[in-house]
Amino acid sequence: MLMAAGVLMASPVNAQISSVDPNEAIDADLGASAAPANNPDPADNRETAIQDGVPTEAAPLDTASAPTAAAAAPLAIPTKDTYQEDDLIGAAEGVFGKGAQGLGKLIEDILKKQGRPNGYIVGREGGGAFIVGLRYGSGTLSHRVEGEKPVYWTGPSIGPDAGASGGSTFILVYNLYDTEDIYARFPAAEGGAYIGGGFNVSYLRRGDVVLIPIRVGAGLRLGANLGYMRFSKKQRWSPF
């Protein structure tokens, strides 16, 4: 009886035991949801990062919208389109005389602050004032790209200014990409004291075009004024 009972108790236990292949069990746990590692979707342009041991999906890489370094950098003005310091000093010495005291240093200081111009004007002018002033001048515009062109200028002024002066003028011209833009009115404000002679520098601007006249005055004049300089292609007698 004891042997029969042992046989009966062992039978259900043996029925519950079955042999299992370990490799098949692992494959069954993975299931069919895992994508093959060697067949990535070419349309899914994403990066995968590992964070705390768990793979995470980063935002898609938009390479088409990323600007290139060349497109983001501003375009520089070509060096060949501006005048070198030696060219400007040589042109100014042709106006004021070679070896004019302080001229080279004055131009050097302007170029350090403003950079190199792409044009300049050499000429002569004269004017006078007693509260209300007048100015007349003529010269030649030298442009780095468009060459030389004649230019004339006039200008009224008003202010506590008295006397008369005349002499040579050298004007540095910046950002003049079309020489037609020089023929316009440029607001002007200046002050000067001429007792026999001396340098005078002023600053004029219209839009992006900047003019820096350098004058050596000869005469007797003292004061300051506000007005404008009007440049034209032909000589004009009206100062307005």
Image (cartoon, grey):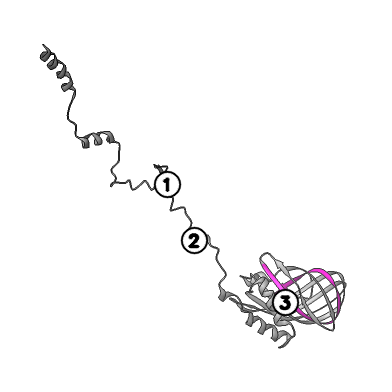
Q: Indicate whether residue 213 is drawn in magenta.
A: yes
- Name the residue tied to disc 1: 60
Question: Residue 145: which quarter of the image?
Answer: bottom right
- Name the residue tied to disc 2: 69
- Name the residue tied to disc 3: 152
Foreground mark, 3 or 1?
1
Could you tell which of marks 1 and 2 lies nearer the N-terminus? 1
Span of residues in magenta = 209-233
Q: Residues within 10 Å of mark 1 (few under 14, many from 20)?
A: few
Find numbered disc 3 in the image and state the secondary structure of the residue it sits on.
strand
Could you say where residue 200 lies in the image, as x and y percent from the top left? 78, 77
Could you say where residue 180 lies in the image, as x and y percent from the top left? 64, 71
Could you say where residue 80 lies in the image, as x and y percent from the top left? 56, 76
Could you tell which of marks 3 and 2 lies nearer the N-terminus? 2
- Classified by dominant secondary structure, the portion drawn in magenta counts as strand
Tell me what residue is drawn at x 65 percent, y 81 percent.
Answer: 88
Could you tell which of marks 3 and 1 lies nearer the N-terminus? 1
Residue type at mark 2: give it.
Answer: Ala
Q: Check whether the beta carbons of the residues at disc 1 and disc 2 lie within 8 A of each other.
A: no
Find numbered disc 1 in the image and state the secondary structure of the residue it sits on.
loop
Q: Quadrant of the C terminus?
A: bottom right
Tell me what residue is drawn at x 66 percent, y 73 percent.
Answer: 112
In the picture, measured across the screen, residue 130 lies left or right of residue 22, that is right
Residue type at mark 3: give it.
Answer: Tyr
Q: CA distance from mark 1 to mark 2?
A: 21 Å
Could you say where residue 129 lies in the image, as x and y percent from the top left? 86, 74
Along the line of sight, which residue is nearer the eye, 122 or 239? 122
Q: Quadrant of the N terminus?
A: top left
Residue type at mark 1: give it.
Answer: Pro
Which residue ends up furthest to the top in the rendered image? 1
Along the line of sight, which residue is nearer the eye, 47 or 162? 47
